[in-house]
Image (cartoon, grey):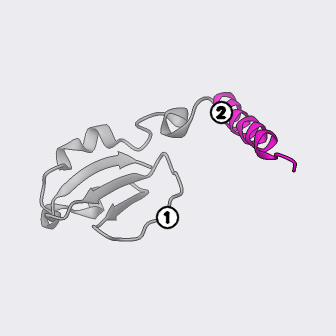
Amino acid sequence: MLDFKAPATAALLAALAGCTQMAEMAGGAGPAASGEDACGAAARQDLVGTSVGALDPATLPDPNRVIFPGQAVTMDLQAERLNVEIGPDDQVARVYCG
């Protein structure tokens, strides 16, 4: 009986290596490729710990999204989008780009 495990493993490793090389050619992987703070999240860290009631979405830069616990969100990466994540205690838990 033929053993296909070794060739399949080799093909998988080659494919993964290609993905890594493509990310390096693109200038890195993830948010670092286009700047860690492309959306200005560093300047908005003062929001962390504030009540959701005190949050005024109109003061947030566009594009933005406020994410509540359990809310479905798209997984697309937009480095210029400011994400404000609300924790289960109705306070801002995290502010980040993406």
In space, the residues marked 1 and 2 are separated at their CA atoms by 24 Å
Q: Position of residue 93 (x, y in %)?
A: 21, 53
- Residue nearest the observer in this picture, 28 or 5: 5
In the image, is residue 16 above or below residue 80? above
Which residue reaches farthest front? 1
Which residue reaches farthest right? 1
Q: Position of residue 84 (x, y in %)?
A: 30, 56
Which residue is label 1 attached to? 74
Task: Residue type at mark 2: give it.
Answer: Thr
Secondary structure under badge 1?
A: loop
In the image, is residue 4 above or below residue 86? above
Residue 96 belongs to magenta span = no
Quadrant in the picture for residue 15:
top right
Q: Position of residue 86 (x, y in %)?
A: 24, 61
Please rate how many residues cluster around mark 1, counting C-alpha atoms within 10 Å: few if below 14, some from 14 to 19, many from 20: few
Which residue reaches farthest bottom? 71
Position of 69 with respect to 32 (left or right) is left
Which residue is label 2 attached to? 20
Task: Residue type at mark 1: give it.
Answer: Thr
Please rate how many residues cluster around mark 2, counting C-alpha atoms within 10 Å: few if below 14, some from 14 to 19, many from 20: some
Between discs 1 and 2, the one toward the N terminus: 2
Task: Please give the label number shown on residue 23.
Answer: none
Q: Main secondary structure of the magenta part?
A: helix
Q: Position of residue 28 (x, y in %)?
A: 58, 30
Secondary structure under badge 2?
A: helix
Position of 92 with respect to 95 (left or right) is left
Which range is magenta?
Answer: 1-26
Residue 17 belongs to magenta span = yes
Position of 94 with respect to 25 (left or right) is left
| Image point (55%, 33%), residue name | 33
Position of 88 with respect to 83 (left or right) is left
- Residue nearest the observer in this picture, 80 or 13: 13
